[in-house]
Image (spheres, rainbow, N blue to C red):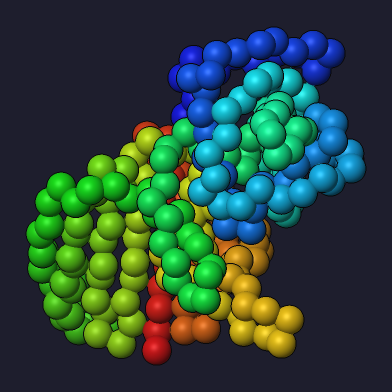
Amino acid sequence: MNSEGLKTTTSNSSKEISDNNTFFVINVFGAQLYEKPSLGSKLITRITVGERIVAEKIVETKQSIHIGEGLQLQGDFIKVKNQFYSGFIHSSDLTTFRPQLESIYDGIMIPNFKGRVKSKKTEKRIEKFNDKPYEIIEDITTYDNVIYTYTDFNDCFENTYLYKHMTLHEVYHQLPVHDPKIDITLKGNFILMPEFIEKKDNQYIFKGIGITRSITILENQDGLFLIASLDCP
């Protein structure tokens, strides 16, 4: 989490912090509010995506959200208290980036962290596949926080999102945001989260949904994270 000025403590103590420590819920399914600073504690409620909270105390517990073998979302517990609720939120559900909320379907909201458009350009190159030349066209859009590249491979296309300032848990929660898939059921409409498959070296691999063949989070040599998805209609 990009949390400059955030003070943490040991699991046996806590400390008051200033009201400047403001966070926003990044989990599209909402942040779980626990009665105590423990993942095994009683769940009080879910705080909706995009909601602003102010941390009252930070408790360092070294507990991680387990997504699968090789993928854990690390974080501390943040104590929140206001006129509506009081409890603890695992910090992997939070970010210091203020999101722009977008309604995508019947009240389903997603957080957009790209920011303002800074530049756009198109690049072309020739690559060989099976000894045949193919023209590759890339449309590159640079935002405040993301560099988005759309690559046309004729039959398929790839979307990549390079995050400039975000950590693994923040990028993980962006997986269902860029190309959201909605499950429409009699019990309601739900956004779908890609299923984690495995970790290979610097890659976190997820199962695609619909025409999306594959989704991957990659960590590059600079420690930056990139989401790449390959779609073949």
Residue 105: x %, y % from top left: 49, 75
- Relative to 65, is 121 above or below? below
- Relative to 7, is 76 above or below? below
Quadrant where the C terminus sits is bottom left
- Relative to 159, is 67 above or below? above
Give the residue at x 65% y 21%: 56
Give the residue at x 64% y 35%: 91
- Relative to 80, is 128 above or below? below
Give the residue at x 28% y 57%: 148
The foreground one among 1 and 182 is 182
The foreground one among 125 and 74 is 74
Q: In this view, does 136 lie to the left or right of 39?
A: left
Residue 213: x %, y % from top left: 49, 78
Q: In this view, does 70 lie to the left or right of 107?
A: right
Residue 37: x %, y % from top left: 81, 29
Give the quarter of the image for residue 184: bottom right
Residue 142: x %, y % from top left: 21, 50
Q: In this view, does 150 lie to the left or right of 63?
A: left
Check the image and name the residue furthest to the front: 83
